Image (cartoon, rainbow, N blue to C red):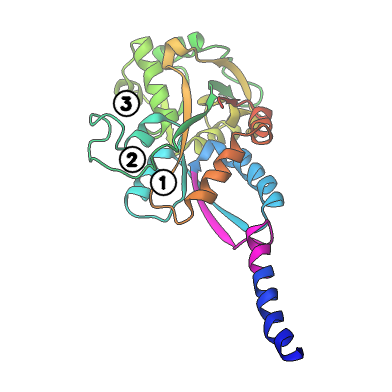
Amino acid sequence: MKRALALILPLVLSLAACGGNSGGGSAEDVELIVFAAASMQETLTEIGENYRAEHPNVTLTFNFDSSGTLKTQIQEGADCDIFVSAGQKQMDQLDSAASSEVNTEGLDLVARGTRFDLLENKIALAVPEGNPKGIHSYDGLKAALEAGDVLLAVGNSDVPVGQYTQLIFAFWGLDEETLAASGVLTYGSNVKEVATQVSEGTVDCGIIYGTDAFSAGLTVVDTATAEMCGQVIYPAAVLKISRHPDEAQDFLDYVRSDAGGAVLESVGFTPLQ
């Protein structure tokens, strides 16, 4: 009898251990690599810390940069589980479901059924402390640009905030090349660089996201309308190359939950889910 118990006991303990793991016990450690637009650095970092408090087995590694740079890194084979872009174009360029006019290389890196529009931002006109040039509106900026009497910081053409700025120029009927040649524009490789130029007062004003103006403590004197540059929508998706698609989806679900949405709203984002 004692010998039978000695044989059975290890089996019972082994099954109990297996049952414990499947029933909410300690989960396997997972690292999720999140590529996200630079404008989400503060909010996603905070959301990630909150998520980690509830999921201590998950390590979140963030890569924040311009959406165009992130898209290129993903296309070139960088490890990535989740992509959050500041514009539809960069996500479309990786998505086989997008128009071939945008996804010109036929890339198929977005996992089906995981893409959604996460939030909306605003394109803000921000000025340094004291507003030395007295720029108070987009109309005033247009007049100052035409007069050559302002130095404006904008994003590069491969950066979503720069592409929204190009739409504003087109709305005004202004030619960006002519403006650049006249010396009234400076550029940043992502929105944080543009915001830094404004913060440091090396420019008279900058076109950035409203949330970046908030994070940097900058004064916003005007916000672009949808007529000027369209809606500023950030899509998010799990990528097909993800090594942990289920966990990646769970994190995205948390980002668009009420808890994640509260953090997004605190800096001026408008959650869409």
Name the spot of residue 147 as percent of width and height, x first: 41, 12
Q: Secondary structure at mark 1?
A: loop
State the quadrant of the N terminus: bottom right
Q: Nearer the viewer, residue 145 or 71?
A: 71
Q: Nearer the viewer, residue 147 or 193?
A: 193
Name the spot of residue 125 as percent of width and height, x first: 54, 20
**Of the residues under marks 1 and 2, which one precedes in the sequence?**
2
* Image: 160 above or below 246: above
Question: Which residue is at the far bottom?
Answer: 3
* Image: 103 above or below 207: below
**Of the residues under marks 3 and 1, which one precedes in the sequence?**
3
Residue 156 left/right relative to 269: left
Q: Nearer the viewer, residue 40 or 170?
A: 40
Contact (CB < 8 A) between labels 2 and 3? no
State the quadrant of the C terminus: top right
Please rate how many residues cluster around mark 1, counting C-alpha atoms within 10 Å: few if below 14, some from 14 to 19, many from 20.
many
Name the spot of residue 144 as percent of width and height, x first: 46, 13
Q: Secondary structure at mark 3?
A: helix
Q: Label 3, label 1: how many angstroms apart (C-alpha)?
A: 40 Å
At x 45%, y 56%, the residue is 243
Contact (CB < 8 A) between labels 1 and 2? yes
Q: Label 2, label 3: how many angstroms apart (C-alpha)?
A: 34 Å
Residue segment shown in magenta: 17-35
Name the spot of residue 256 as percent of width and height, x first: 59, 34
Question: Which residue is at the far right?
Answer: 2
